[in-house]
Amino acid sequence: MSTLKRVYVTRQIPPEGLRILRESGQVQMDLWDSDDVPVPREELLRQVRGVDGLVCVLTEKIDTELLDAAGPNLKVLSTMSVGFDHLSLEELKKRGIRVGYTPDVLTDSVAELTVALLLATSRRLIEATHEAKTGGWGTWRTLWLCGHELANSTVGILGLGRIGVAIAERLAPFKVKKFIYADVAPRPELASVIGAEYVSFDELAERSDFLAICCALTPETKEICNKHLFSKMKNTSIFINTSRGGVVNQEDLYEALATGQIAGAGLDVTVPEPLPTDHPLFTLKNCVILPHIASASHTTRNAMSAMAANNLLQGLRGEPMIKELHP
Ligand SMILES: O=C(O)[C@H](O)CO
């Protein structure tokens, strides 16, 4: 009888992770062999039947239905993501299923992209290239395409963790005057790295010239960025979200951008994803929307896939994982 553990991988993850799984000699792996199309739900429910381990990405909802379909053999779930709002943690815990995820390895890439998005939004780069390409570039004009600069600004971070610190470290050389942050509790150790001041949620909104959203999506943070927050922000402020779309009330954000309540927004994440091309946010010049690419560098995606594979194998061996979520 084979001692290989049965594993299903819900996406063609980057090569490093697949290599680790294939060469482990530990698993018999089935794979949804596409990166372009997520595994259809029906197919997923069929494929997970009786598996010992599952590697997923953030497009798969790991909920009661799926765990019921998998059955009692399932002992380890490994998600190739730092975010875990697609997982029913309570249900996983109840069933004693161990959960691996991939923090840290993506911090640099996400921080880098956040800075790029912030600059693209505040200095109106997308509008500017569009104007240059489509004949809007007349004479040099004194106030045309003026944006907002980081020098002497106050940068606010909602949810100070590894990524927020990494963003601040990258922004500091732009001569930011002050970093402030809000969170459920002060994070003195992390804050001291970037000299950030702990403030209330309202103060964060009122004082930030740039507001970077870095908190996880949880029931507490769902749509926490809504008209209350936007109404307290300055009309010169830039709002940047690279965490999860669900932390923002998009109708309220649209209103704030369309009425000039805030100056601009850069979003790498939306609800839903993909955001329909006829969504009102796409009509706004002061809203830059990216298709969830914050961790999308070759190095990082391979590192995430390797970590997801190693987490799974360690979990199946009953060893500590490199990065395990303890719900
Ligand atoms: O949760 C994550 O890992 C990011 O959103 C995608 O890399």
Image: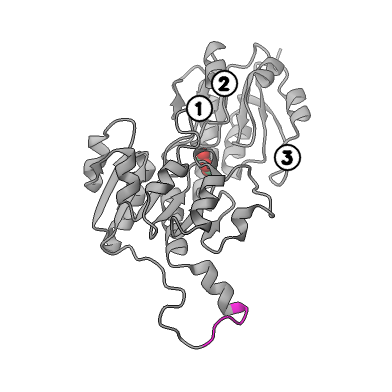
Q: Mark 3 = which residue?
A: 33
Magenta part of the chain: 133-138
Residue density around tag 1, few if under 14, some if 14–19, many if 20 or more, within 10 Å: many
| 316 sits left or right of 187 in the view | right
Separation of disc 2 and disc 3 at Cα? Answer: 21 Å
Characterize the magenta stretch by its predominant secondary structure: loop
Is 52 situated above or below 100?
above
Q: Secondary structure at mark 1?
A: strand
| 300 sits left or right of 193 in the view | right
- Image quarter hosting the N terminus: top right
Is 13 situated above or below 62?
below
Q: Is mark 1 within 8 Å of ligand 1?
A: no
Residue 237 located within the stretch drawn in magenta: no
Position of residue 112 measured from the top left corner of the image (x, y, whole percent): 42, 54
Q: Are marks 1 and 3 in contact (CB under 8 Å)?
A: no
Q: Earlier in the sequence, mark 2 or mark 3?
A: 3
Q: Earlier in the sequence, mark 2 or mark 1?
A: 2
Position of residue 294 measured from the top left corner of the image (x, y, whole percent): 50, 50
Position of residue 96 measured from the top left corner of the image (x, y, whole percent): 53, 12
Q: Are marks 2 and 1 in contact (CB under 8 Å)?
A: yes
Q: Mark 2 = which residue?
A: 76
Q: Mark 1 = which residue?
A: 100
